[in-house]
Amino acid sequence: PRASTALWSQLTAAGLTTGPMPGVTDSTTPWYVRVMLGIAGLIAAVFLLGFVGTGFLFVVRSAPISMVVGLMVVAAAFAIFRTAHHNDFAAMFALAVSLAGQLLFAYGLFRLSGGFRAAAFPFWVIAALQMVLVVVMPNTIHRTVSAYAGGLAFAYACGLSGAGFMAAGVTAMAIAALWLQEARCGSRHAVAIPMAYGLTLSFLQIEATSLFWFSMPAVLGARLGPAAWYWTGTMLTDAVFVVTAGVLFLRAGWTLREPQTLLALGALVALCIVSFQAPGITACLLIVLLWFSNRNRLLVGTGIAALALYMGGYYYLLHVTLLEKSTVLLVTGLVLLGARWSILNHVMPQEHADA
């Protein structure tokens, strides 16, 4: 359409995009329909994998054959995606085929490695494979699922390697970079945004395990590192939270030397300090903060819902006394209210008066 061409020309002139205007890469199916199709694809993948296991026993009995056949099945799914265009049913079938192939590949990989508790190498391989699929597979649902699985595999790999504290911090940096650069993605938008959604979901799940004071790999039998490493991971996430806010301030035309910038950053640092024993709070607020740079209602809804679930789960933990939990939540709430009052009256008094 001419309107789209004119808009793309304006964006190119403003330096926000480069190259030719991308074509339509996916259908306009609502996101909730795509979620249902993704769940249906996962269920279909389980049945398809069961069919392969019962009908072709020689495949599952040999780890190398399982890996080779799994990659061949994934390649077949790629071919279906390329020819399906905007047919949702064909895309769901391709998704089921791809997931079945990935599960078959992972099964053979873990068998060669001695099990999923033996080493971190299989999880590194799976994480790398998922990132490749995010770029290669021309389907939004598949890219989101692959990014989510890749984020979790990365977390398990870090934990089994003795560096579990890196998982949340690195994932937070990745999603902050993706969401902050959404307007500049251009032709890479079809890859970057599903990746951002998938990594956001994996990030929230990684942070949710902090409710139990152990990392996700601990479920698989990984040894926990010193408590200092746990707090290091929390500090990395808090640093991403503060830096993201600083980037948004600079985009709004504020300088780092202005009193309003220092006051706002000081309020965020105080929030990180008082919620240090409940790191999921700043993680969820990071998701909400990124919404303000994108005006993404789905993203802010996810962040608020995760924050409510985290605070509810944190309040009912047994390893912290009721007095300690109440104190942390009370002080955090007071700091948030104080930060809001300071911002409305000292940082943005004109906007407050207009409202």
Image (cartoon, grey):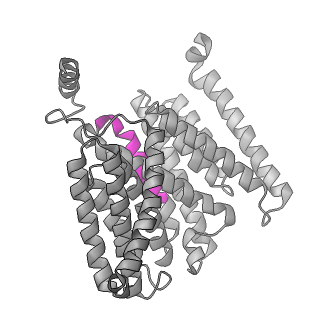
Q: Magenta segment, which residues?
A: 169-184
Could you tell me which residue is drawn at 40 percent across and 53 percent down?
A: 174
Could you tell me which residue is drawn at 81 percent across and 50 percent down?
A: 327
> Of all residues shown, which one is farthest toward the right?
323
Q: Position of residue 97 (x, y in %)?
A: 33, 62
> Of all residues shown, which one is farthest toward the left?
20
The kind of secondary structure the magenta stretch mainly shows is: helix
Q: Nearer the viewer, residue 269 or 189?
A: 189
> Of all residues shown, which one is farthest toward the front?
55
| Magenta span includes 181 | yes
Quadrant position of the N terminus in the picture: top left
Could you tell me which residue is drawn at 34 percent across and 55 percent down?
A: 93
Q: Horizontally, is 313 left or right of 245 in the view?
A: right
Up-down relation of residue 249 to residue 215 (above or below): above
Q: Position of residue 250 (x, y in %)?
A: 41, 33
Q: Position of residue 162 (x, y in %)?
A: 50, 77
In this rendering, the count of numbered labels is 0
Could you tell me which residue is drawn at 80 percent across and 64 percent down?
A: 318
Quadrant position of the C terminus in the picture: top right
Q: Horizontally, is 209 left or right of 186 in the view?
A: right
